[in-house]
């Protein structure tokens, strides 16, 4: 047994205080959340800023007709987004859940099926584009002067499909392997290179609007190379493996974890197409200008919302697999704190200083400015509720809920069109601005009704906005210790009490306590050796004839497994641990050390 400097007599004497002091902390997970948050916001910023600058560059190089062609090609971009949302977000969420369950082999098969599916579908799109770009261009526009250049642009977009879909879809898996900074680098490099290559393909190779599609593909091709480099040399578990028919049959199931995001892509396009037409019919060019400004505020705040929810998704997915309900609560609270903070700061900007928005976009016309000031203030009132609704939607799809994420997306976009139509008919253009916050209220009412019904079915509280995934194992032991040996001994004593209280024989309970102490001491020694500090989360569950103990810690990777046969010291913690445990498994999940110890009762 590890030398702790605390006698068993002292341990027994301190049982009461030990029970009172030992509890679960969210510090380790909150630190991981903050580590992910900034890279996710920067990745969203890089992508959105590039789209804005890319439009300016193309318009200046090729004129307004080029922008019209790009807008006509939006359905192809929508197809990309639906595929990498369904398979990329859905597959990576399922991958993270399986990692949390300790099923790395199954997770690899999900990764492999996802990559094969994205590759296969994108190749189908490529061949479809080669064969049908001409007829499709005729469907998308009646303008004969635009049809031929649109055909070439569509063909270029379809040829780019494999690179775009695979690169963006793969970024979600790389993030889930504990490399959030890679997404930032990929999107920043891809989109900066996209703008540079616009000039190269358009000015030097005279490729016209087709060059913009090839420029985007070139940027994401380099991004894909960066991802492959990280996968190859950073020790991630992302490896392609052989899959069978049963694995492929599971594809629709884990795609459901991305269905809310995919449906949201349809809603985004719907807003632009349908509501653009409506505001133009009600107020002409003034309506279009003001609606564009309102949507710019929407895009601005969406950068931060996307950063928060994309941070939440992989962490919640892993915790869902681990059945760590306390950890999920910590992440929900942390996520909502940042969401509330960003939303309030944005509302202060939009409500108190809307003139800054007009100044940034050079709005000088008195009539446009007067309407825009009113519109921005009214339009923005819905952001607090809407951002919470998006957070709920993304959370629900991550834990495997199927109906509510689609319902929220549907209400957020499609029903919004109906509300705009009604209020626009009653109150004119100002009815459109009021429709957005009113629709957010309607969506929240529906969410509350669904939440109330779910709570009644479960016999719990009246409203549960963020339902916890079921905890299939019981009883469950859950504490956090600081990086010192005294806490390791306290945790050992507490789990011995826990085991004894649930009918485990005294000798077996002592072995369970010994396993916890030895693994905790080994982790602490590694932290001291590398001059690192950090807390250690310890969970244990009783499962029929087995006790499963899970350790989570930050810091450098370390695994007890490679040293099991090499340690000569009979008192070494790893030597003791491996002799009393039936199995010791190690993995690196979200950039944290994850060790599972199994002991038969």
Image: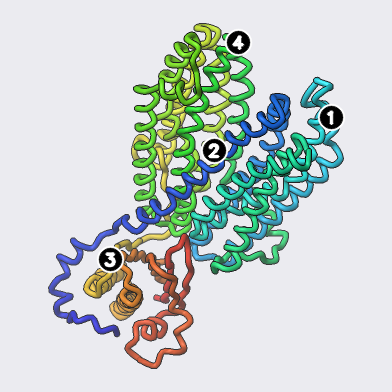
Would you identify the image quadrant in which residue 340 lies? top left
Residue holding disc 3:
481
For the residues labelled 2 and 1, the Cα–Cα distance comes to 30 Å
Seen as rendered, the residue at the extreme bottom is 568
Dot 4 and dot 2 residues touching (CB under 8 Å):
no
Q: In the image, residue 247 lies at what x, y percent?
A: 67, 59
What is the distance, in whole Å, between disc 3 and disc 4 at their CAs? Answer: 64 Å
Please tell me which residue lies in front, 397 or 57: 57
Q: Are there few (<14), some (14-19), or many (20+) residues within 10 Å of tag 4?
A: some
Q: What label sits on residue 284 in the rendered view?
A: 4
Q: Secondary structure at mark 1?
A: helix
Q: Which of the two discs, 3 and 2, sits closer to the camera? A: 2
Q: Disc 4 on helix, strand or loop? A: helix
Q: Please report whichever mark, 4 or 2, sits nearer to the chain's N-terminal start.
A: 2
Disc 3, SS: strand
Residue receiving disc 1: 148
Q: Are marks 3 and 2 in contact (CB under 8 Å)?
A: no
Label 3, label 2: how many angstroms apart (C-alpha)? 43 Å
Please tell me whether residue 564 is drawn above or below residue 242 in the rendered image: below
The answer to which of marks 3 and 4 sits earlier in the sequence is 4
Marks 4 and 2 sit apart, C-alpha to C-alpha, by 28 Å
- Nearest to N terminus: mark 1 or mark 3: 1
The quadrant of the image that shows the C terminus is bottom left
Question: For mark 2, does the 10 Å Cα neighbourhood hold few (<14), some (14 to 19), or many (20 or more) residues?
Answer: some
Q: Residue 472: x, y in percent?
A: 44, 57
For image coordinates 73% across by 38% down, the residue present is 203
Residue 72, can we see it? no
Q: Which residue is mark 2?
A: 49
Vertical arrangement, residue 580 with respect to residue 408, above or below: below
Question: Reading the chain from its start, which is encountered first: label 4 or label 1?
Answer: 1
Give the side of residue 425 with respect to residue 482, left or right.
right
């Amino acid at each position: 047994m590890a030398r702790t400097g605390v006698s068993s007599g002292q341990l027994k004497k301190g049982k009461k205080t030990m029970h009172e002091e030992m509890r679960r902390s969210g510090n380790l997970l909150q630190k991981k959340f903050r580590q992910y948050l900034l890279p996710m916001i920067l990745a969203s910023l890089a992508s959105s800023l590039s789209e804005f600058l890319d439009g300016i560059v193309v318009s200046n190089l090729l004129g307004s007709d080029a922008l019209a062609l790009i807008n006509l090609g939006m359905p192809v971009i929508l197809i990309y987004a639906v595929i990498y949302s369904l398979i990329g977000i859905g597959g990576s969420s399922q991958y993270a859940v399986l990692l949390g369950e300790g099923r790395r082999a199954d997770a690899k098969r999900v990764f492999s099926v996802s990559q094969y599916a994205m590759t296969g579908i994108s190749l189908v799109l490529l061949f479809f584009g080669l064969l049908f770009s001409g007829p499709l261009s005729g469907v998308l526009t009646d303008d004969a002067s635009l049809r031929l250049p649109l055909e070439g642009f569509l063909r270029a977009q379809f040829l780019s499909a494999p690179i775009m879909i695979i690169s963006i879809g793969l970024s979600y898996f790389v993030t889930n392997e504990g490399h959030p900074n890679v997404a930032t680098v990929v999107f920043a490099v891809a989109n900066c290179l996209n703008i540079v290559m616009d000039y190269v393909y358009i000015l030097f190779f005279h490729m016209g609007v087709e060059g913009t599609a090839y420029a985007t593909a070139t940027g994401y091709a380099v991004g894909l190379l960066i991802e492959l480099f990280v996968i190859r040399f950073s020790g991630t578990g992302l490896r392609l493996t052989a899959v069978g028919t049963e694995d492929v049959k599971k594809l629709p199931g884990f795609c459901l974890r991305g269905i809310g995001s995919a449906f949201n892509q349809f809603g985004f396009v719907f807003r632009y197409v349908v509501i653009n037409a409506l505001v133009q019919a009600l107020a002409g060019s003034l309506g279009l200008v003001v609606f564009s400004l309102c949507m710019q505020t929407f895009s601005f705040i969406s950068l931060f919302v996307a950063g928060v929810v994309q941070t939440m998704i992989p962490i919640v997915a892993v915790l869902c697999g681990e059945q760590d309900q306390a950890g999920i609560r910590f992440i929900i609270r942390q996520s909502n704190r940042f969401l509330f903070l960003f939303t309030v700061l944005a509302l202060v900007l939009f409500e108190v200083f809307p003139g800054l928005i007009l100044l940034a976009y050079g709005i000088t016309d008195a009539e446009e400015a007067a309407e825009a000031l009113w519109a921005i203030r009214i339009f923005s009132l819905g952001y607090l509720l809407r951002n919470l609704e998006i957070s709920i939607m993304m959370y629900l799809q991550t834990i495997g809920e199927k109906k509510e994420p689609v319902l929220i997306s549907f209400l957020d976009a499609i029903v919004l069109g109906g509300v705009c139509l009604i209020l626009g008919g009653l109150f004119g253009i100002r009815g459109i601005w009021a429709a957005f916050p009113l629709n957010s209220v309607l969506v929240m009412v529906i969410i509350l009704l669904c939440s109330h019904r779910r709570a009644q079915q479960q016999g719990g509280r009246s409203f549960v906005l963020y339902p916890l995934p079921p905890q299939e194992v019981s009883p469950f032991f859950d504490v956090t210790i600081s990086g010192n040996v005294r806490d390791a001994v306290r945790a050992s004593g507490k789990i011995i009490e826990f085991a004894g209280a649930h009918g485990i024989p005294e000798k077996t309970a002592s072995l369970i306590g010994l396993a916890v102490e030895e693994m905790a001491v080994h982790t602490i020694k590694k932290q001291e050796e590398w001059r690192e500090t950090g807390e250690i989360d310890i969970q244990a569950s009783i499962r029929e004839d087995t006790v499963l103990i899970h350790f989570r810690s930050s810091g450098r990777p370390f695994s007890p497994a490679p040293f099991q046969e090499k340690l000569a010291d009979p008192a070494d913690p790893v030597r003791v641990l491996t002799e009393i445990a039936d199995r010791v498994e190690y993995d690196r999940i979200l950039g944290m050390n994850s060790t599972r110890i199994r002991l038969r009762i």
